Structures are given as structure tokens and as C-alpha cells.
Image (cartoon, grey):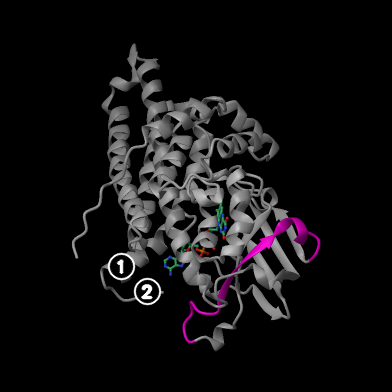
Amino acid sequence: MTTTLALGQDWSDLREAVAKICARYPGEYWRRLEDQHAYPTEFIQELTHAGFLGALIPEEYGGSGLPLRAAAVILETINRYGCTASQGHAQMYIMGTLLRHGSEAQKREFLPGIARGELRLQAFAVTEPTTGSDTTRLKTRAVREGDHYVVTGQKVWTSRALHSDLMLLLARTTPLESCSKRIDGLSVFIVDIRESLGQGLAIRPLQAMFNHNTTEVFFDGLRVPAKNLIGTEGKGFTYILDGLNAERTLIAAEAVGDGRYFIDQAVRYANQRVVFDRTIGRNQGIQFPLARAHAELEAADVMVRKAAALFDAAQPCGTDANIAKLLASEACWHAAEAAVQTFGGFAFAREYDIERKWRECRVYQVAPVSTNLILAHVAQHVLGLERSY
Ligand SMILES: Cc1cc2nc3c(=O)[nH]c(=O)nc-3n(C[C@H](O)[C@H](O)[C@H](O)COP(=O)(O)OP(=O)(O)OC[C@H]3O[C@@H](n4cnc5c(N)ncnc54)[C@H](O)[C@@H]3O)c2cc1C
């Protein structure tokens, strides 16, 4: 079947509106947050009230009902103007699992509050300390007891859990040995963090290389109402997969935004900094890495647009979302490295924000899925090579 896909509008009105908000949150705001390990509450509130973080929620539930491409533009723009999208991005896409697989009652209960910003659904608990990328082996168990599930286990890197009201949890409801397929027997729940803390749920901050408000989460007999199970028990892995495709596409857009931030900053600096009686930007040794990174970002952006277009057309987009994330993460890193070389010693001075953004953008090659796992997916599912793991 041949499919024609437009690569997406550019949403210049959205870009302008988001850029205006970003202008009110300069580098010193983000540096101060980092010093205090704090959450960008004001920034996130402003984005929410302007409707940006409810972009993907349909209008009937109080959101803006925009396509994934528009959400990608919003996140790209936030990073392009020096702010940090990752502390709000989850509010956009975690709800997708609820939207696509939840009951009408669950959607009515949660989505309007999420759209208004009164409810934060910003935490997505999948990764575990002992199983990492091997998601289907995760050990957190949820066992049905009457009208509740009792949850026991541990998660790691559950970002923003201490700044969220709700958490989307992936847990095993049927032991792996009793399942015919590894992807069976996993279920998705909405956990109300507010009423669970101290009642079988404990959350500890996990200090990281950049300010990401990430945590370790401990479940010790936490009782989750059975009505908070999303969809059918045991089918949770397939439910989160389409959410992961949206996540990968959006994070790829963030990486493109960061990459363009580095290029903008480096070009401006290269045109001003005079050494040996001429601006450093006249040297090809400065120009070429920036030009190459720009070209790579343009190519990655086309893949981001393709992945979003497929998602918005409800077509399979797993491979494209993965490839977009792979290319964007590497293009962004090359732009970051080129910016550091361009700024020289001043790249290391906090006031220029290059070192902060450089630390922030390294994660794209590791999370939410690492480069090797994407390559393994392409090798197996696109090229038809043997499964390597
Ligand atoms: C800042 C940050 C925020 C995060 N936020 C969240 C979150 O909100 N929710 C959540 O659930 N998770 C989150 N994560 C976790 C993230 O998704 C994982 O770190 C990532 O999936 C990799 O898992 P791992 O760290 O356990 O690495 P591992 O699985 O231990 O892998 C380590 C290395 O080995 C490689 N490797 C493993 N197996 C193979 C193989 N078969 N072939 C080739 N190479 C292989 C990997 O590619 C990787 O390079 C976050 C992580 C970070 C750093």
C-alpha cells in the first residue's frame, strides 16, 4: 500500500506563543532551580493555563485536541529558546494510555482535571533497578484481592513522582512463567499518589546529572482500587506501546529543539568572539562542525515529522518513532559538542547555559530507550536479522 503523508504544518502561531512564554524564563531561572533541585512550577503552570500541556487531550475532555505534530512543535520550541521541556512533557503524553484504553468513566474522572492543570499526571513508572531495558521481566507485582490490587515492588527513575498527583504504573498481574508470551500478564494502573503516600507507597528523590526531579518508588502492599486498572488485565504492555511511540516522537522533537538552541547560541558567539584579530566564526574549524550538526538536525526533523504524521494518521509508527529518536539524539549531541568547542572555556561558565544544556541533552541517547535497543529493533524488525537478545 502506498501512503501519501504530509510532513506536518509548521504551526508558526504556536511557535510564537510558546517563545513569548519562554522569554519570561531566562537561563538564571533554570540555574536557580538547579541549585535548589526545584521544579519549574511557575513555568509549567503558565504553559498549562495557555493550553499547551493539554494539547493532546480532546476538546470534549477540556483539552485543545491538537495532533501530535503540534505537541512536537510546542516541546521543540520550549527547548529551542533555552527552557527545559522535559519537566512538563509527560503531562502531555502519559494521559494517552488513559485516553486510548481507559473507560469512559476514567476519562471523565481524570482528563478534564489534567487539561486544566489541576491534576498532574506526570509520572510513568516502568523501569526497575534489576531489569532495566528488559521491560517484560519487571518484577513489581499487582495481585487482585477483592475490589483492590495489592502492589509490591520497586521502580527507579520515575521522574517527577514527587511533583505529580497521579502515576501511571506498569506491573505484573500474572507471573511470567504462566504466560505464553512475554508481553502478556502486565497491567497498567492509575495510582493516586496523594492518597497512597505513606500507605504502602514511598518516594525518594534520586539526584541526577541534571535537574530532572527523578525518583525511586517503593511499593509495599499498596492497595490500588480495581477501578483504576486501565483496560483489560494482562494487556498493559500493548497499551503502553502506542504511548511510547508518542513519547519517542515528542522527545525527538525536544532533541531537535535543544540542537537548534546550541546552533543559535554558537553562531551568535562565533560572530562576536574575536581572537587573533578576527571573529572565530571565520574559521572553518568552527564553521564546519556547526554546519554539519545543522544538516543532521534538519534530517532528524524530517524523521520527527514523518513519525508524527504516521501517528496522527493512526498508522504503525514504532520504527519511525524509534529512528526519529535515534537520529535526533545524535544530531543534538553533535550540536552540543560543536557549541562547547565554539564557546571554548566559556562553555564551562554556568552563566552561558551551554554546560547546563549539554548535561541535559546527553540523556536522549539513553532514555526513554537507549540507542542500542533502537538499533536492535531496526536490525530485527526492519532488516530481518536474527533477534540478538
Ligand atoms: C534522567 C532519566 C529519566 C528517566 N525517566 C524515567 C521515567 O520517568 N520512567 C521510567 O520508567 N524510566 C525512566 N528512565 C529510565 C530509562 O528509561 C532507562 O534508563 C533506559 O530505558 C535504559 O535502562 P537502564 O538504565 O536500566 O539500562 P540497561 O537496560 O541496564 O542498559 C545499559 C546499557 O546496556 C545496553 N544494552 C542492554 N541490553 C542490550 C542488548 N541486548 N544489546 C545491546 N545493548 C544492550 C543498553 O543499550 C545500555 O546502553 C529515566 C532515565 C533517566 C536517566
**Structural crowding at the residue carrying mark 2, measured as other residues with C-alpha within 10 Å and reported as few (<14), some (14–19) or many (≥20):** few
The residue under the point 44% across, 55% down is 246
Q: Earlier in the sequence, mark 1 or mark 2?
A: 1
Closer-to-camera residue (365/64): 64
Closer-to-camera residue (112/163): 112
Q: Are marks 1 and 2 in contact (CB under 8 Å)?
A: yes
Kind of element beneath mark 1: helix
Residue 184 magenta-highlighted? yes
Residue at the disc numbered 2:
388
* Image vertical order of residue 50 relative to residue 153, above or below: above
The residue under the point 44% across, 45% down is 71
Please identify the residue farthest to the top as the structure is shown. 277
Q: Is residue 196 visible?
A: yes
The residue stretch that appears in magenta: 180-199
Q: Position of residue 309 (x, y in %)?
A: 32, 52
Tell whether circle 2 marks a residue whose Cβ is less than 8 angstroms from ligand 1. yes
**Amino acid carrying mark 2 in the image:** Ser
Closer to viewer: mark 1 or mark 2: 1
Residue at the disc numbered 1:
379
